[in-house]
Image: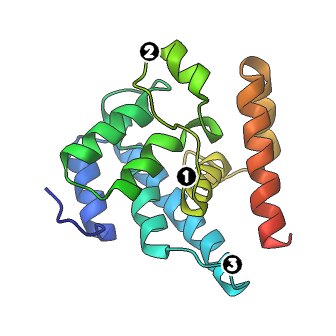
């Protein structure tokens, strides 16, 4: 059980191990955290306020649900794990909302998920979701590859990821 505060990097990795996340998933989460922190740092340098500790904790734990499911519901599963561990609501929301650039209310209903918001809302949620889309395994890939991949079966998700890319890159000024 984690205290009411945000877990450190070490505590987050311990939680991943506690739930038997594979070494591959842990490596992915670390890569997403590193990239998310890089993006958040660039935004901070532009005068945009970002909670770096929240970004790190959320990014490290975003795929904790993959210890039980590799399907689209791993975000919901991970949020349940995070809640059971007493993690702050902000971390739970990052885990719940990172999948596919967000899941709409209609899609969530189709999946039979509890009524909730499954699309990233805060800047920290968006940064983690975006960084996750830029990491394949533990390597950085162009966002266009992820959008093309999603375009095949998930046009709506591809469009959400494209919009997320536009939003973050416009904030970065790239």
54 on left or right of 141 = left
**Residue annotated with mark 3:** 42
Precedes in sequence: disc 1 or disc 3:
3
Asked whether 114 or 72 is in front, the reply is 114
User: Which dot, 3 or 2, sits closer to the camera?
Assistant: 2
Q: Which quadrant of the structure image shows residue 4?
A: bottom left
**Residue at image point 30% right, 68% down:** 6
Q: Which mark is residue 112?
A: 2
| Residue 56 x %, y % | 45, 66
Crowdedness of circle 3 by 10 Å Cα count: few (<14), some, many (20+)?
some
Is mark 3 in CB contact (under 8 Å) with mark 2?
A: no
31 on left or right of 167 = left
Number of on-image labels: 3
Precedes in sequence: disc 3 or disc 2:
3
Q: How is the image coloured?
A: rainbow
**Residue annotated with mark 1:** 138
């Amino acid at each position: 059980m984690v205290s009411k505060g945000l877990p450190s990097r070490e505590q987050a990795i311990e939680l991943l191990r506690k739930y038997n996340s594979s070494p591959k998933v842990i490596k992915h989460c670390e890569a997403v955290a590193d990239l998310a922190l890089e993006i958040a740092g660039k935004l901070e340098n532009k005068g945009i306020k970002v909670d770096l500790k929240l970004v790190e904790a959320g990014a490290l734990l975003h795929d904790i649900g993959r210890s039980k499911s590799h399907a689209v519901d791993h975000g919901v599963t991970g949020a349940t794990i995070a809640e059971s561990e007493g993690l702050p609501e902000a971390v739970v929301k990052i885990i719940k909302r990172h999948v596919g650039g967000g899941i709409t209310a209609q899609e969530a209903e189709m999946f039979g998920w509890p009524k909730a918001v499954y699309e990233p809302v805060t800047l920290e949620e968006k940064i983690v979701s975006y960084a996750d889309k830029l990491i394949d395994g533990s390597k950085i890939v162009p966002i266009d590859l992820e959008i093309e991949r999603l375009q095949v079966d998930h046009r709506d998700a591809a469009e959400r990821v494209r919009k997320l890319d536009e939003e973050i890159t416009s904030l970065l000024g790239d």
